[in-house]
Each structure stands twice: as C-alpha cells, then as structure tokens.
Image: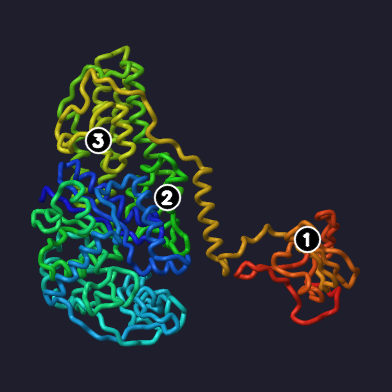
Amino acid sequence: MSNRKMITAALPYANGPVHIGHLAGVYVPADVYARFQRRLGKDVAFICGTDEHGIPITIRAKKEGVTPQQIVDKYYGIIKKSFEDLGISFDEFSRTTSPTHYETSQDFFKTLYEKGKFTEEVSEQYYDEQAGEFLADRYIVGTCPSCGNDGAYGDQCEKCGSTLSPTELINPKSALSGNVPVLKETKNWYLPLNDYEDFLNQWIIEGHKDDWKSNVYGQVKSWLNDGLKPRAMTRDLNWGVPVPLPNAEGKVMYVWFDAPIGYISFTKEWAEKNGKNWKDYWQNENTDLVHFIGKDNIVFHCIIFPAMMKAHGDYIMPSNVPAFEFLNLENDKISTSRNWAVWAHEYVADFPGQQDVLRYALLSSAPETKDNNFTWKDFQTKNNSELVGIFGNFINRVAVLMHKYYNGVIPEGNASAEELAEINKAAKEIHQSLEKYEFRNALTALMNLARFGNQYLQTEEPWKNIKENPEKAAHSLFISAQIAVALGQLSEPFLPFSSEKLLNMFQVERQDWATLEEANILIPSGHQIGEATLLFSKIEDDVIDAQIQKLENTKKANKMTNPDAAAAKEEISFDDFTKIDLRVATILEAEKVEKADKLLKFKVDTGVDTRTVVSGVAEHFSPEELIGKQVMILLNLAPRKIRGIESQGMFLLTEKPDGKLTFVTPDEAVKNGVQIG
C-alpha cells in the first residue's frame, strides 16, 4: 500500500449551501479517512472545491436575478465556512473559476484534441426559440422513460438514478421558458467512450471485483454491459470554461469534463503553496488516488473521468471510489428545492460548540451500503445516551477521581500487555474498518472502548478501594487514565474538537496510530492533568422540538400552492364568521389627508348609509381614479381615529405580484349594500 494518499471529495455545486445529506454521504467520511491516514504518517493531500460551472448555477442566477459570478461568490463563502466550522480538514478548498483551473482544464482539453481523441459531430440539440439559446441537459425537463418521474432532467433522473440524454425524455420542456423546445443543428466535440470499454473492463471489472464497494462495481458493470456511447464534451453556453480552439466561439466545456479536472488544478494550487510537486500525486503510480462521492456521481468518476485520464495518458487511475448511498431526513428524501434539509451553516448557528455531535450522528447513520435516515430524536438519543452517557461520562469520572484522590497527578502504576489489550484491539479494529471504508464499524469500535472503560471503573471501584486497598485504587485509575487518553487519541478522526479538548485536559500530545496498536503506556505516572471539563452536554427536548417544528413549517409551506402567500391565520368558528358584515359600496369622494403621505380620506355610499373611511393607499392610487369605483367594505368594524379622522370601516385589497395594491371589486355593477358571503 502506498505511503502517498491523494484523497478527493466530490465538488459541491456553488448554487446553495451544503446539507446533512452531503455531509453524511461524502464530506464527513472523507475527512475521517484523511485524518486517519495522516495519523498513520502518510503523505496526504485532501482536496476539494466548489463546482462553479454547472447548469444549477445559471438556474439559480436567473431565479435570483443576478449574475452567475455573484451566485458562486456567495455560495463559495458559505460552503467553505461550513466545512471549516465542522472540522472538514481539506488541505485545499478552491473553486473552478480560479485562473489555475481555467489553465489546467484548457491544457487538458487541448492535449486530447491534439492527440486526436475527440470526434467532431454535428447533431440536433434542443433549442429554446423564445430564450434564443441551446439548452444544456439540465435546462430540459420531462418524463423519465425508465420510471415515469415527471421531473427528470436531460442528463439524469434523480428519482431512479438513470443516466439519460435529452432526446430520451418524454414530453421535454425548456426550464427557461416552459415551452416545448425544437431540435436545431450544432457542432460539438465528443469523447468516444466506447473506445475505452476494453480498458475499463480490464481495470474495474477484472481488477477491482473484490475490493470495490458492491454498489460501485455493480453500477459500472451494468453500464459496460449496456455498451458505452460517445459523449459530448462541449456545450453551447455562455457560462463555463471556454473551449480553447479557434473555431469554438460560444462553446464551453461540458461541466463533467472540467469539474473533475478541478481535483488536479486544486492540487496544483496546494502544491505551489507548500513546496510540493503536484505530479507526485497525479502522475506517480506509487500514489493511491481515492475519490469520495455520492452514488449519483459513480458514472462520472468511474467511467467518464477515467476515460479522460486514459486518453490523456499521463495520469494514474483511482485505487478506490467509495460511493455512499443517500441520507433521508425524517423518512423523506432530502430536497433542496423543497427546503427539506438540515443545512450545515444553520446547524452550526443553532448548536454552537456541538459540531462533533453532528459528525457522530451522521457517521453512526452513514449510508454506506443503502439509503439511511436521520431523525432529530435519534440525534438527541445519540448525544444524550452515547456521547454524554457513555463517552463523556467515562472521561469525566476519570478526571474527577484523579483530582479528588491524587490532585490531578497520575498515580504510580504499571500495565501489562493484557491490561492494555482493549486499547490495542480498538485501535486495530478502527484501522481495519477505515481501510475498508466501513465507518460505522470503526465508530462502534471506538464506542466499545468507552463502554469498556465504564465497565472497568464499575468493576474496580477505586472510590471504595482508596482506603481499604490504595495500591489497587491507584492501579485501576492508572489503567483508566490509559483508556481515557486512548479515547482522546483514537477519537480524533471522528470527533476532532472533542479529541483536542480531551487531550488538552490530560495535557498530552497527539501520537502516531502505530503507538496505539501496541502495548504502550500512553500517559506516565507523575504526569499532571488539567481541570476536569465536560466534553458533551445534554440536549434538551425543547431544542429538538424547535428543530422538528422548523421542519413541520417547511412541510406546510411545501403544501401551499403559492409559496409567497402568508401563512393561514388561526381557525375561527362559523359563529365568528357570521359576525362579519361585508358589503358592496361605491366611493363618492376621495382626497389626500394633510401631512400624511400614505393616507386617503374617502366618502363612501354603503347602501346602508354614507360614511367616512381612511385607508393607507395613497402610494398606489390617485384620489381622482377612485371616485365612482365599487369596492368591498367591512361594514361592522369598530370605528377608530386615524390622524384625527374617525374611520368607519375597512376596504378589501390584495397585493399584485409587482407589489402594487388593488381593490377587491365585483365583476359587474351591483347595488350598494349587497352583502357578500
């Protein structure tokens, strides 16, 4: 196994924040793995960055009425800070709009072009006549031919996972205008993936049958069995990396051509800052390249990107592509469009100082081999019962007892290999599990050591032996201190903030992993520890109830046919409703109220009487245009004085999409005083 690890994490789209599905399915496991490899003493480059050229970027920009650059600048900052706040230890987190990335991806494209790896093809592609532009795959929506999902995109159905081409969609429509697009001829450069079938079969199907995850291997095998086809590597768009050819005006690189090259360009940026040679990590066969991705990216990382690198000729292939399944939220699919998510930046704000709790909850429910589920109640239980009740409880007991009986000094003692066996066992089990990308098993091994520590204390009872058998009490607390420090060392990849806090409490430095797998004393007699502090705190019901209520509010909002509408008010009884007296009335006179820019004073014929009404509509109407207008009036509203004028009713108005007010009026003229309802 190589001493050099090139670890990448899928590039998040810079069109929105990251949520717990992203964290559980890619970034937290990747971070655990990178931290662990560093502890093994490996030469690690852990690389990521935002994908800033995808169609979701331009869709978000159109929706918000800003430029794509403004969108990516905004979300790059939000995403980067979220990762930092949650302890995701990237060596480099860059972006695909960087100058280095443009240069690297264009050089890559030119190399393939000059080697004759592309074919130029004129094809018919969908064109939106109203928008006046060709439609990229994500700008075309329709019905999936595989599962019947009406919201499939032109490149993929996110419901069933099928990879599609736009012409396969049933009833395609433009996401720009909603119109049915037309087919129009255009020229693009294609990479004939079928030329790489033999290579991919030999490399993956024959070479990685036993060591790659079954979901990855199975999906790739299915693709290869169906036969690969040429795929366009350029697009007719105005946002992306320009195709570096003289006859390619208006063409940009396909996002799945330039995005994975970001791994390379970001490594270049990191290497330049740190005096490294980037080629050691991408063009040296003694390097292990590992891609952490979600299952929806398997085809791009196991077929398209490897084919690109093979066509180039200078790059190594990944040794593994551990793809995770999806995480659901409260038994429903996480959806950014429905705001059905727990957003990373909101979690950090709502749970200050509790980043490790989320890391722990997501790792313990990691969707390694099948979709899994996150619930707030389970999150609370994992914190209160496991982190507080088992892990934190043991550490606190050891530190408190050490201060109570020995003034915080590790007592005289020694430990046999047998007495340190549980520590060594945990270290080895974590090691073996993480090398196989089994994060839940690794976390279980860590927690089992904490459980053992609690059981050991209960069995040894040093608080009883301190008087009757002080040597035994000292020995048992010496062993307990070894377990406590071991937990601090072993937990670092999983719970980096808590690990640092624990090691600082015991005033010890971080050690190499190999030390933990052997029968070594981790903290010597005579060593002074710091004051006991709590690693974790209980999360109360009201905190969890607030998060559940937030999701309930989201669910209600998703059911609204107009998401911009105000929420419904509290229910009233039928008897309450019958008290309302709504009538048709005619405005007889209208004039401005002195020294009040927003108020108009009206004289109104209600059919019952003639009365005065004051209303704040002066910014939307002139007095002259309202005279003679029939309106709806709430007749039995208690009078009140406005600017010294007694107002005897209220008009019914509504707001138009442009923010202007309009009166609710009858469709045709009726007699004043006619009741409504």
Distance from the alpha carbon under mark 3 to that under mark 2: 28 Å
Q: Nearer the viewer, mark 3 or mark 2?
A: 2
- Residue shown at the point (32%, 70%) measured from the top left: 161
Nearest the eye: 278 or 248: 248
Residue 193 is situated, as x and y percent measured from the top left of the image, at: 18, 76
Q: Are marks 3 and 2 in contact (CB under 8 Å)?
A: no
Residue 48 appears anywhere in the view: yes
Residue 415 is situated, as x and y percent measured from the top left of the image, at: 18, 24
Q: Amino acid at mark 3?
A: Gln
The label number, if any, that marks residue 576 in the structure image = 1
- Residue shown at the point (23%, 17%) measured from the top left: 526
**Label 3 vs 2, first from the N-terminus:** 2
**Label 1 vs 2, first from the N-terminus:** 2
Q: Secondary structure at mark 3?
A: helix
Instruction: Tell me which colouring the rendered structure shows.
Output: rainbow
Residue 226 appears anywhere in the view: no
Considering the image in quadrants, where does the C terminus appear?
Answer: bottom right
Q: Secondary structure at mark 1?
A: helix
Nearest the eye: 131 or 434: 131
Q: Secondary structure at mark 2?
A: helix
Q: Amino acid at mark 2?
A: His
Residue assigned mark 3 = 489
Image vertical order of residue 306 relative to residue 490, above or below: below
- Residue shown at the point (35%, 61%) measured from the top left: 13
Locate residue 673: give its quadrant. bottom right
Name of the residue lying farthest toward the top = 467
Distance from the alpha carbon under mark 3 to that under mark 1: 66 Å
Residue assigned mark 2 = 345
Name of the residue lying farthest toward the front = 595
